[in-house]
Image (cartoon, rainbow, N blue to C red):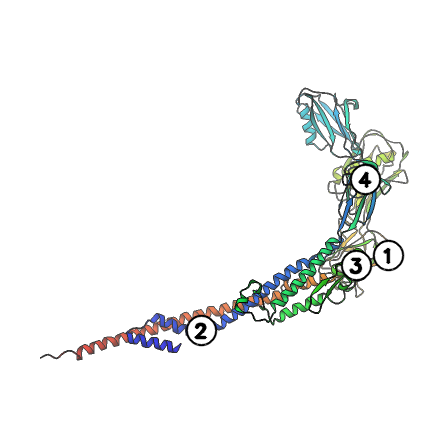
């Protein structure tokens, strides 16, 4: 560089001038060339490592999307259900049903009540008599006022359809004449209705029944079942049955089985992507020297970018550890991945024996689930573990139940004549159900059997606004002569209040009745012997369920069961089979990778952040060097400008001397 500067200076001096700007740049560049070279090399290394880590992180995230499926129990809790004749009975999964084959016959479909007025009219706007039309549906009288504003076929139709009467109305054209048609909105025998009160709509003979209200009837494994609708949601837990047609005395069947296909495919995918991840680790940490031509190939873009990285070695070590060793608290037929057909050779390549996995899934899928997933279980048939959080620790926790969840339930007095209960005139009572408001229920007077009255009252209550928030009540019979009322909700929010009975003495309903439910209660014991009260974490909507807070403490320490969610459906109030919580291999692997790439403290996350900070510091140093360059350039420009002035003055002096002393002599 000094030779170049010197040559340039000599040449300029020889030619009588200096390019001050160019010479200043050359000298300034020479001063900052060394520091800039150091920064360029450092930035190249940072870019290389950052690119490699970003590529590795993206592949780890993709791999974890497969691992996540195996890490949860949901994959192993899938069921399939089929009907031998879908045109008769459809079936769908709504929860966790019990596998098996169930036989049934479809005796009759549930239908809604429809009547058509016999009287015919000339047009939609034909007038009808004014007055009060009384609708009696589900044992409840409802009044429909007909006055000058709606005293026509279309007017009555619109009044009914815009109100909450439980029926719909339409006007049908029959050969150019018009008739009124009325249909119940809900199916079932209890929703049959009558109309009376004004001429033409005052007597059963004024109407033709075109569809008689009836319940659906089936026999299920030999047991006769009736239902107000064609959907049976509560016949078998976890199944929804849809009755589509009647085929009396023809045997049909429904088959429920565990769906192992999804689990099989998930395991196969896991093995495949694990081997892909292994190859990525091998490639990115390779020491192989590539030629310029090979380096340009797309498949070699990330080869060797993290060669010699201790971070890569640590990640690989953590992943291997996640897939080895024992699973704490694990019980059952399968204790290792090899037990279900997953093995790894000396080079770290994973392989799967599909036949062995199929045998395991078909033999004991729950044990396979615990081998892979994070979750809990209990040998107690009345205790189900529903979920957990990342705070829940593996272990075995003794549980003692001191109080089972109960529903609110009241029992009326003895009916005077259970087969012939007379309600003289209109009967009324008020009901408050669960957390709803008190609602008045009205029943039509008449004579009922105990069974008829219980069905009538249940339908009336569950069709009223008392059940508008999802609250439901079951009305049954105790000792053959007492009506019972039971909320379908468990827990402290379960409540029944029956008050203000009118004209219901013969049914044994005179005095007010009230009761509240209760939540499950008891203790869970931690590994250090401390206990946690579970009643404090009972679900307010279903008192059988418990969800321990993520911030719960036991014995002054964070509870090991934080985030644990389970339900107690029954059984004794005593010490029960422990709740075991395990973290299987897939769950361990998922959390290991997620902790390294998905949290601020993870190896990859920390390193990428560190590289970004280093790069920012290099940029700051580059800015300082650029500022130094600008100052040096200005300094040298001024110096060379001064030199240029001096040289210019010397040229002028030389010209003057030459002109003075070299002039020709006069003769």
Q: Which residue is mark 2?
A: 33
Label 4, residues with CA under 10 Å away: few <14, some 14-19, many ≥20: many
**Which image quarter: residue 548?**
bottom right
Q: Are marks 3 and 4 in contact (CB under 8 Å)?
A: no
* Disc on the earlier residue, 3 or 1: 3
* Disc on the earlier residue, 3 or 2: 2
Q: Which residue is mark 4?
A: 498
Q: Are marks 2 and 4 in contact (CB under 8 Å)?
A: no
| Residue displayed at 89% across by 31% down | 420
Quote the CA–CA distance across marks 3 and 2: 67 Å
Q: Position of residue 109 (x, y in %)?
A: 79, 35
Residue 533 appears in the figure: no
Quote the CA–CA distance across marks 1 and 2: 82 Å
Circle on res. 207:
none
Of residues 397 and 501, the one drawn nearer to the viewer in this rendering: 397
Label 2, residues with CA under 10 Å away: few <14, some 14-19, many ≥20: few
Q: Quadrant of the C terminus?
A: bottom left
Quote the CA–CA distance across marks 2 and 4: 94 Å
Label 1, residues with CA under 10 Å away: few <14, some 14-19, many ≥20: few
Q: Which residue is mark 3?
A: 367
Point out the frontmost of discs 3 and 4. 3
Of residues 3 and 73, the one drawn nearer to the viewer in this rendering: 3
Quick one: SS at disc 1? loop
Of residues 666 and 470, the one drawn nearer to the viewer in this rendering: 666
**Which image quarter: residue 563?**
bottom right
Relative to 349, residue 365 above or below: above
* Disc on the earlier residue, 2 or 4: 2
Q: Which residue is mark 1?
A: 574
Point out the frontmost of discs 1 and 4. 1
Left or right: 258 with respect to 659? right
Q: Position of residue 217 (x, y in %)?
A: 82, 37
Quote the CA–CA distance across marks 3 and 1: 27 Å
């Amino acid at each position: 560089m000094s030779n170049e500067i010197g040559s340039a200076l000599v040449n300029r001096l020889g030619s009588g001038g200096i390019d001050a700007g160019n010479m200043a740049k050359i000298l300034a560049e020479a001063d900052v060339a060394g520091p800039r070279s150091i920064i360029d090399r450092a930035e190249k290394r940072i870019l290389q490592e950052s690119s490699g880590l970003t590529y590795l992180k993206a592949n780890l995230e993709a791999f974890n999307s497969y691992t996540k499926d195996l890490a949860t129990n949901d994959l192993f809790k899938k069921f399939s259900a089929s009907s031998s004749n879908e045109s008769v009975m459809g079936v769908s999964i709504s929860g966790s049903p019990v596998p098996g084959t169930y036989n049934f016959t479809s005796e009759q479909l549930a239908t809604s009540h429809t009547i058509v007025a016999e009287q015919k009219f000339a047009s939609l706007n034909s007038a009808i008599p004014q007055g009060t039309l009384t609708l009696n549906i589900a044992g409840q009288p409802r009044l429909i006022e007909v006055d000058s504003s709606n005293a026509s076929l279309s007017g009555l139709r619109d009044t009914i359809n815009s109100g909450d009467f439980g029926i719909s109305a339409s006007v049908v054209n029959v050969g150019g004449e018009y008739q009124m048609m009325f249909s119940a909105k809900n199916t079932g025998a209890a929703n049959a209705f009558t109309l009376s009160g004004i001429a033409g709509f005052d007597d059963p003979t004024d109407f033709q029944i075109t569809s008689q209200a009836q319940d659906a009837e089936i026999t299920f494994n030999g047991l006769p079942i009736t239902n107000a609708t064609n959907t049976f949601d509560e016949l078998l837990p976890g199944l929804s049955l849809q009755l589509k047609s009647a085929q009396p005395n023809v045997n049909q069947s429904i088959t429920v089985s565990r769906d192992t296909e999804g689990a099989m495919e998930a395991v196969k995918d896991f093995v495949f992507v694990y081997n892909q991840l292994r190859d990525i680790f091998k490639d990115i940490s390779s020491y192989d020297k590539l030629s310029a031509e090979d380096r340009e190939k797309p498949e070699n873009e990330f080869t060797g970018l993290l060669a010699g990285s201790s971070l890569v070695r640590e990640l690989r070590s953590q992943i291997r550890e996640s897939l080895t060793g024992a699973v704490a608290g694990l019980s059952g037929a399968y204790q290792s991945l090899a037990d279900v057909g997953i093995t790894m050779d000396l080079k770290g390549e994973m392989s799967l024996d599909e036949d062995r996995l199929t045998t395991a899934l078909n033999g004991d899928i729950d044990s396979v689930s615990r081998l892979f997933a994070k979750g809990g279980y209990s040998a107690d048939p009345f205790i189900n573990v529903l979920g957990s959080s990342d705070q829940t620790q593996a272990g075995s926790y003794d549980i003692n139940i001191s109080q089972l969840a109960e529903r609110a339930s009241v029992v009326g007095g003895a009916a005077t004549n259970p087969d012939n209960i007379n309600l003289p005139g209109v009967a009324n009572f008020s009901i408050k159900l669960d957390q709803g408001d008190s609602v008045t229920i009205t029943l039509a007077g008449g004579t009922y059997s105990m069974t008829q009255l219980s069905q009538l009252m249940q339908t009336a209550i569950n069709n009223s606004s008392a059940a508008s928030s999802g609250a439901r009540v079951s009305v049954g019979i105790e000792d053959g002569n007492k009506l019972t009322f039971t909320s379908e909700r468990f827990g402290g929010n379960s409540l029944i209040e029956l008050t203000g009975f009118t004209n219901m003495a013969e049914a044994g309903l005179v005095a007010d009745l009230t009761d509240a439910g209760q939540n499950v209660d008891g203790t869970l014991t931690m590994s250090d012997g401390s206990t946690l009260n579970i009643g404090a974490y009972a679900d307010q909507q279903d008192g059988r369920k418990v969800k321990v807070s993520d911030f719960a403490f036991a014995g002054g320490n964070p509870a090991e069961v934080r985030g644990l969610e389970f339900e107690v459906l029954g059984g004794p109030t005593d010490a029960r089979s422990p709740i075991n919580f395990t973290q299987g291999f897939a769950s361990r692997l998922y959390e290991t990778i997620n902790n390294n790439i998905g949290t601020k403290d993870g190896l990859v996350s920390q390193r990428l952040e560190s590289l970004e900070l280093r790069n920012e510091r290099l940029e700051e140093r580059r800015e300082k060097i650029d500022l130094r360059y600008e100052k040096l350039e200005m300094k040298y420009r001024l110096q060379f400008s001064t030199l240029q002035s001096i040289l210019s003055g010397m040229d002028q002096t030389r010209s003057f001397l030459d002109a003075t002393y070299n002039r020709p002599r006069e003769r």
